[in-house]
Image: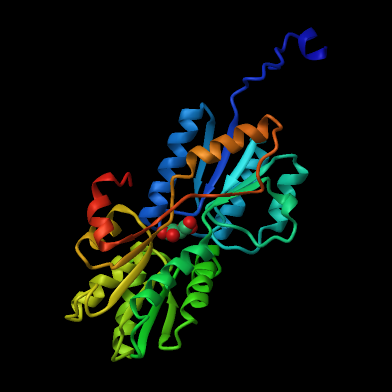
Amino acid sequence: TNAESNGEQKDTSSNKKITLGFSQVGAESGWRTANTKSVQDSAKEAGFDLKFSDAQQKQENQIKALRTFIQQKVDVIAFSPVVESGWDTVLKEAKDAGIPVILTDRAVDSADTSLYETFIGSDFVEEGRRAGQWLVDQYKDSTEEINIVELQGTTGSAPAIDRQKGFAEVIASNPNLKVIASQTGDFTRAKGKEVMQAFLKANKKIDVLYAHNDDMGLGAIQAIEAAGLKPGVDIKIITVDGVKDGFVAASEGKINFIVECNPLLGPQLMQAVQDVVDGKEVEKRIVTEEGVFTSEDAKRELPNRQY
Ligand code: GZL
């Protein structure tokens, strides 16, 4: 062929190093840090060349990163979309460039599901249901009005939308369980503390806090203690994620119930990358396994937690 005749060596070997472009949401929480480590460690383990970009929780930075990966002609693009909407244009550019895309952690709301090979991540509605179910069980014999405040995740993100939906769906079974305030804390400790301070100022009776992640819950605990109240006692606290600091707070009785959200998606992602490159069929939806933990469970499990 031409390549051989003019001396270039065409790399026709099937073990050409796979290049993966990964656009990460940011570094907003303990969960995110564990997720990034899992992706980076697994890519190294798989022998892939990983191009990693941190978007500082901004969609425009993720779109820029995806366009850069397309220009670099990476073999596969993977990303965790910071919000659900606004991806169709750049995903069509990837498709037109013949570069397969894999979604991890968060979903997109694109109607055209041919724009990505698979979505590997948790069922956030189910996580919300599990949080709600614990609360329904706690108050099943009570006729008292229970005031709940909710710290939502990043506005427009799949976990925030779905965790709110699942929770509301389940607590609707007991009309005494009322969400009296619900606001975003953007998944960060600082914002969670700030919004909880506002909730405490505006509401004289708060019985329960439902925080869409541990980090906002941990920020809220600082505000609750600063107000002279006992977290886990005066105000029951339910969080989602199950990172180390969340487990420590739960083992101390400051968080009453943790719904786990597994960040260790790296191995499943790299397997999907390899399968896509090999032209193998990949499940359109890969759901991650995860559990739930009371304070008692957290005390027992803390030594075994990896992140
Ligand atoms: C959930 C993930 C969320 C975590 C937060 O899969 O997208 O983002 O629950 C993180 O801790 O910030």
Give how far across and how far down residue 222 sits, in percent.
23, 71
207, 108: nearer the viewer:
207
Q: Residue at x 51, y 71 (%)?
A: 166
Horizontal arrangement in the rendering, residue 69 relative to residue 27 (left or right): right
Image quadrant where residue 202 sits: bottom left
86 in relation to 32, above or below: below
Horizontal arrangement in the rendering, residue 112 relative to residue 22 (left or right): right
279, 55: nearer the viewer:
279
63 in relation to 205, above or below: above
Image quadrant where residue 4 sits: top right
Image quadrant where residue 191 sits: bottom left
Horizontal arrangement in the rendering, residue 94 relative to residue 296 (left or right): right
Colour mode?
rainbow
The tally of labels here is: 0
Given the current orientation, which residue lies at the most extreme front position?
141
Give how far across and how far down residue 193 sits, in percent.
31, 72
Give how far across and how far down residue 12 sits, in percent.
71, 17
Q: Residue at x 57, y 53 (%)?
A: 62
Given the current orientation, which residue lies at the most extreme right position?
1
189 in relation to 114, above or below: below
Q: Residue at x 28, y 57 (%)?
A: 297
Give how far across and how far down residue 254 sits, in percent.
23, 68
207, 92: nearer the viewer:
207
Quarter of image, ligand 1: bottom left
